[in-house]
Image (cartoon, grey):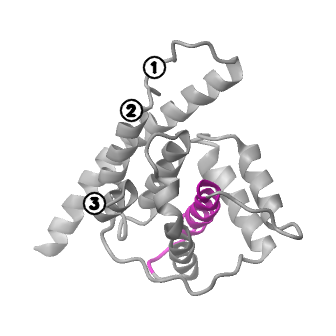
């Protein structure tokens, strides 16, 4: 039982369908979804350098594509999933189905992307939490933000490090922590509202 499998077992509400393809989306589709993510999600929660995402996309669509780490693949597919699902207007529409497809493409990378003890784990958990906000049918944001906050504390992101860091690295570290904190404040009321809705529907 890896940490990733523990996270997914605790947080998945409904089974994720298997991916339907192993190809990258068309480049214009990818760039459109990333632009939507940057404008509507990243602008509020800039947890990682924007340049890391844009350079990743450039590398994937160059000839030949550059190899990527599991954490980079997770970043790519989860940003597409969030950018697509956030535009969905009803369960089952094309944006919603595409979001699920992109999540399914990310999940094979979970064991390495969510591996404890690495900064990349924080970003990977935060991205999964972001997706859970727009697809509570499949993921429980309550558990995910709990795992994310625990990982942030384990890595010491709740306080400035004793060792000296560049001002840029320190600012990036603080920004990541405050994005996680903001999602913690957001996830709790949404979780309780979702529970009340389900309880009412069940009655």
> Which residue is denoted by mark 2 in the rendering?
154
> Which residue is denoted by mark 1 in the rendering?
159
Q: CA distance from mark 1 to mark 3?
A: 28 Å
The residue that appears at 44% across and 78% down in the rendered structure is 91
Name which of mark 3 and mark 2 comes first in the sequence: 3
Magenta residues, start to end:
70-91
Nearer to the camera, 46 or 161: 161
The residue that appears at 47% across and 56% down in the rendered structure is 128
Q: Quadrant of the N terminus?
A: bottom left
Can residue 42 be spotted in the picture? yes
| Front position among marks 3 and 2 | 2
Q: Secondary structure at mark 3?
A: helix
> Magenta stretch: dominant SS?
helix
Q: Residue furthest front?
A: 1
> Which residue is denoted by mark 3 in the rendering?
10
Nearer to the camera, 7 or 185: 7
């Amino acid at each position: 039982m890896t940490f990733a499998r523990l996270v997914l077992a605790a947080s998945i509400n409904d089974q994720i369908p298997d991916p339907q393809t192993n190809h990258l989306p068309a480049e214009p589709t990818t760039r459109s979804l990333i632009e939507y993510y940057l404008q509507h999600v990243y602008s509020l929660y800039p947890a990682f350098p924007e340049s890391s995402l844009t350079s990743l996309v450039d590398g994937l669509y160059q000839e030949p594509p550059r190899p990527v780490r599991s954490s980079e693949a997770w970043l790519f597919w989860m940003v597409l999933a969030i950018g697509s699902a956030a535009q969905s207007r009803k369960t089952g529409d094309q944006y919603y189905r595409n979001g699920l497809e992109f999540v399914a493409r990310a999940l094979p990378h979970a064991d390495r992307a969510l591996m404890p003890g690495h900064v990349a784990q924080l970003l990977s958990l935060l991205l999964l939490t972001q997706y859970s906000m727009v697809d509570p049918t499949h993921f429980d944001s309550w558990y995910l933000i709990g795992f994310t906050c625990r990982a942030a504390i384990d890595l010491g992101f709740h306080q400035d490090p004793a060792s000296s860091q560049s001002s840029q690295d320190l600012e990036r570290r603080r920004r990541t922590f405050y994005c996680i904190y903001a999602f913690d404040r957001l996830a709790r009321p949404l979780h309780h509202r979702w529970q009340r809705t389900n309880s009412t529907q069940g009655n």
